[in-house]
Image (cartoon, rainbow, N blue to C red):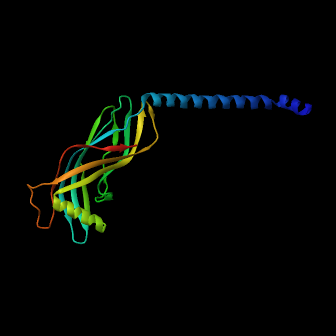
Amino acid sequence: MSEKKDSCHIHGTCKRHKLYRRLFAAFLLLLILVALVILIIWLVLRPTKPKYYLQDASVAHLNLSYAGLLTSVIQVTISSRNPNDRIGIYYDRLVTYAQYQGQQITASTLLPTGYQGHNDVTVWSPYLYGAAVPLAPYLADAISQDLHAGYLLLYVRVDGQLRWKVGTWTSGTYHIHVKCPAFLALDSGKPKDGDGSYYFRFQQMSACSVDV
């Protein structure tokens, strides 16, 4: 045992081991302090989910064939507001589409992405296209009844990814899911086309539910 101790002191290995342990402990403590500071800032700022509104929606073309195939052209206007005073939002990816009773009836359309500053408002007005989308028999019957009644309830969905920005710090990626109800009424000023297409107009601006 004494020989091992002497050898340890002669070669300085014990001192190096102690130095390494102290450096590692200091580095670990620094990481914990940085994480604690970020957590405190995060809790104080409390990021609020962005607010979405469906401002307008118009059905320029909607046709249901006898085979239960739905073709549609829908233009929507969606606005997004960042309600945070000190937190910015990076939108990395956003797509929008229309749903009827839980089924997607248009293709997904990409929305422009980028940075949304404090209390900034962003507005998108994309077209949503659905070409011969097959509907389940019960959905085809339901939408046929709605068309004849002259009223239609669709949902405009926005799905994507975002990151929060606080000062120079940027968070990891979060998923965002937006659901906007669109209550539409048959536009009596536009008669139905010869191919059986319908035109619908938007009733009023509606707030959207947002899940992050």
Q: Nearer the viewer, residue 138 or 72?
A: 138
Quarter residue 20 falls in: top right
Q: Is residue 10 visible?
A: yes
* Residue at horizontal 36 percent and vertical 49 percent from the top: 159
In the rendered image, the quadrant that contains the N terminus is top right
Q: What is the x, y in percent for residue 142?
A: 25, 63
Quarter residue 10 falls in: top right
| Placement of 95 over or under 90, stated as above or below | below
Q: What is the x, y in percent for residue 57?
A: 20, 49
Q: Nearer the viewer, residue 88 or 210?
A: 210
Q: What is the x, y in percent for residue 44?
A: 45, 27
* Residue at horizontal 52 percent and vertical 28 percent from the top: 37
Q: In the drawing, does residue 191 fall left or right of residue 88?
A: left
Q: In the drawing, does residue 8 fall left or right of residue 42?
A: right
| Placement of 208 over or under 45, stated as above or below | below
Q: In the drawing, does residue 107 fall left or right of residue 165?
A: left
* Residue at horizontal 87 percent and vertical 30 percent from the top: 5
Q: Is residue 132 visible?
A: no
Q: Nearer the viewer, residue 93 or 104?
A: 104
